[in-house]
Every structure is written in structure tokens, then in C-alpha cells.
Amino acid sequence: MSKLGSFIRSKREENNLLLRHLAAKLDVDVAYLSKLERGERSVRLEHVVALSEIFNVPSGELKVLWLSDQITELLASIQDDSMALKALNLSKKELSTLTH
């Protein structure tokens, strides 16, 4: 299950929203939302913004979860743990030089 998917399910249940109610608020199909929660589909960035408004959560918090899921999905597709880890470390170094 994706981190963002788990978060969506948790917040939906916390707010006593049925799948169909949240799906209507997002203007998506119930089956699609169910797949998002289970991590079977990727959440679109536009839905991240909408979810932050629906659940009154800072969009930055949800974007971090979204990005983490995107990175994990990409690196998992490599099927070579050492190569994926090297790529992640290289990206981390590059990002640190951009922010300093």
C-alpha cells in the first residue's frame, strides 16, 4: 500500500466519509478511489491538492507523501536494489548541491 493511499483511507475513515462521498468530492469513480487507497493506482497531483483542502491538511505534507510514493514506485521498477540505491544516493547528492 502506498503511503499516500494509507493516509487517504485513514483520513476518510477519521472523517466518517464513505468511499462514494470522497469519490464525489474528487469527481472520480469509486473503484478508482479504492485502488488509490490500496496503492494499486498512482494519485494524480491535482488530487493531492484537492485532498489537502478536503481534509484541511497542508498540501506540502501530502506532496511529500506523493513524491515518496512516486520515487519508490520508480526505483522498485528497476529490480536491482543496488542500482536503485546508487541512483537514489546520486539524486540526493545532486539535490543537496542545488539547495545550498
Image (cartoon, rainbow, N blue to C red):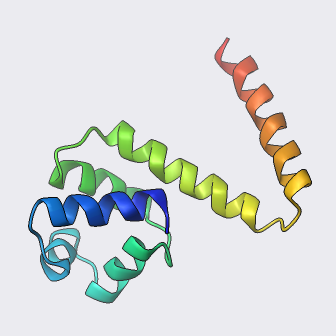
Q: Nearer the viewer, residue 28 or 62?
A: 62
- In the picture, measured across the screen, residue 6 lies left or right of residue 24, that is right
Q: How many marks?
A: 0
**Residue sticking out furthest to the bottom:** 31
Image quadrant in which you'd find residue 24:
bottom left
The quadrant of the image that shows the C terminus is: top right
83 to 18, vertically: above or below: above
Residue 6 at x, y percent in the picture: 38, 63
Q: Residue at x 84, y 68 (%)?
A: 79
Q: Residue at x 50, y 78 (%)?
A: 40
- In the picture, measured across the screen, residue 63 lies left or right of residue 57, that is right
Residue 95 at x, y percent in the picture: 71, 28
Residue 87 at x, y percent in the picture: 84, 45
Image quadrant in which you'd find residue 98:
top right
Residue 50 at x, y percent in the picture: 25, 56
**Residue sticking out furthest to the left:** 16
Image quadrant in which you'd find residue 90:
top right
